[in-house]
């Protein structure tokens, strides 16, 4: 749920539309295995791109890679991305991170909402919107520093460009808000959203950072270290929502694949009232082996593959669905999970291969009552 257009967001944040960067238009460009979402701005109509609203109760494996340390957790649930650190975490550094598969090029503006769910004062945990070029990071964050931290026991907003010390320290009592990072050239500015002022407030600006003008991925994450972690016996829990690209060029490596919903059927009619399954065939080609698709990553218009048995085996098999001499992957997706309107429409498939390649395909369907 987007917290703009003068409406209260899921975390109670009100961000008026006039506060959003304006852009002239947006389009997808597909070329080979590369897909780019291009946003031009400022000026013209509102065309911010929502990267993820976390409303599916299953983290998209075509948008995010997950990194979790022992004693940490990360899960999309209840319309948000929840992150956690167990109270017994103690050894070295530990973090829960979702890393975008897509990257930002050139100048950009990215933001996310956050909420603190279980957050004892001065617990030694940092939460942030982080940019990384694969080696170095820049963070706009919200932290609860403990008595063991070099900053002392404080609740703060901060900016950090590793390996330097945090800058732009702002004391706060916020338990929910929004974080934003904007890059122009090599200059990077971090913001926090101030509900009292109904606008963005600068945390700090770096004229140049260690990521420079490099392409960067973005990651909502939470982290701490055994030397400063002080959870006071409680699990640390926080949540993110609405990762939004206000301006910039977002490049997502995606391979286009052919698929056939309900092989052998024409039209491809789907009754959303059915409690059954719908077969979908991902077709192999001379340059693509459908057997490399990870069944658990498949999403067809929001519908996931049915899992069966005590071990949760995916209901998939191989067959030559289009009789071209190549084995295809046929999976049964749950009808009740389709997020698509009645009538003629296009069902979009998203999936991932064993080597992490992102896949996209589509087929026409007819949704019937």
Image: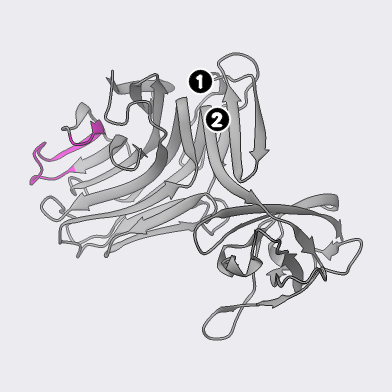
Is any atom of residue 195 visible in this view?
Answer: no
Q: Quadrant of residue 300?
A: bottom right
302 versus 277 height, above or below: above
Choose between 285 and 201: the one closer to the eye.
285
Q: Does the magenta segment cover residue 224?
A: no
Q: Report the Cα–Cα distance between label 2 and label 1.
A: 9 Å
Q: Which of these two is toward me, 169 or 319?
A: 319
Q: Quadrant of the N terminus?
A: top right
The numbered disc on residue 19 is 1
- The segment highlighted magenta reads 145-163
Q: Position of residue 97 (x, y in %)?
A: 36, 51
Q: Which mark is residue 4?
A: 2
Q: Residues within 10 Å of mark 2 (few under 14, many from 20)?
A: some
Q: Residue at x 53, y 86 (%)?
A: 310
Q: Decide which of tag 2 and tag 1 comes sooner along the chain.
A: 2
Residue 276 position within the rendered picture, expressed as x and y whole percent measured from the top left: 75, 74
| Among the 4 quarters of the image, the one containing residue 147 | top left
Looking at the image, which residue sits at the far right? 266
Residue 134 makes an appearance in the image: yes
């Amino acid at each position: 749920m987007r917290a703009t257009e003068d409406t209260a967001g899921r975390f109670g944040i009100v961000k008026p539309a006039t506060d959003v960067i304006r852009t002239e238009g947006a389009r997808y460009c597909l070329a080979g295995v590369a897909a780019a979402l291009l946003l031009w701005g400022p000026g013209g109509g509102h065309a911010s791109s929502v990267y993820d609203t976390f409303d599916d109760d299953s983290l998209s494996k075509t948008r995010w890679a997950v990194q979790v340390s022992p004693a940490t957790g990360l899960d999309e649930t209840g319309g948000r991305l929840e992150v956690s650190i167990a109270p017994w975490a103690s050894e070295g550094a530990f973090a829960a991170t979702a890393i975008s598969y897509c990257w930002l090029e050139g100048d950009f503006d990215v933001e996310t909402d956050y909420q603190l769910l279980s957050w004892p004062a001065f617990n030694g945990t940092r939460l942030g919107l982080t940019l990384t070029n694969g080696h170095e990071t820049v963070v706009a964050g919200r932290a609860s520093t403990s008595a063991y931290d070099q900053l002392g026991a404080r609740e703060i907003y901060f900016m950090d460009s590793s390996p330097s010390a945090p800058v732009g320290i702002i004391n706060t009592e916020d338990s929910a808000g929004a974080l934003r990072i904007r890059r122009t050239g090599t200059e990077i500015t971090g913001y926090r959203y101030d509900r009292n002022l109904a606008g963005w407030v600068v945390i700090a600006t770096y004229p140049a950072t260690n990521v420079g003008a490099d392409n960067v991925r973005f990651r909502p994450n939470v982290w701490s270290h055994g030397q400063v972690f002080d959870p006071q016996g409680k699990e640390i829990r926080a949540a993110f929502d609405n990762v939004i690209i206000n301006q910039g060029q977002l490049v997502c490596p995606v391979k286009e694949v052919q698929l056939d919903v309900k092989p052998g059927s024409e039209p491809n009619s789907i009754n959303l009232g059915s409690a059954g399954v719908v077969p979908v065939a991902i077709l192999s080609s001379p340059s693509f082996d459908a057997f490399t698709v990870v069944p658990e990553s498949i999403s067809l218009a929001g519908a996931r593959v049915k899992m069966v048995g005590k071990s949760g085996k995916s209901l998939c098999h191989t067959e030559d669905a289009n009789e071209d001499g190549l084995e295809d992957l046929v999976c049964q997706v749950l009808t009740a999970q389709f997020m698509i309107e009645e009538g003629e429409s296009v069902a979009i498939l998203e999936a991932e291969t064993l080597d992490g390649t992102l896949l996209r395909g589509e087929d026409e369907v007819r949704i019937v009552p």
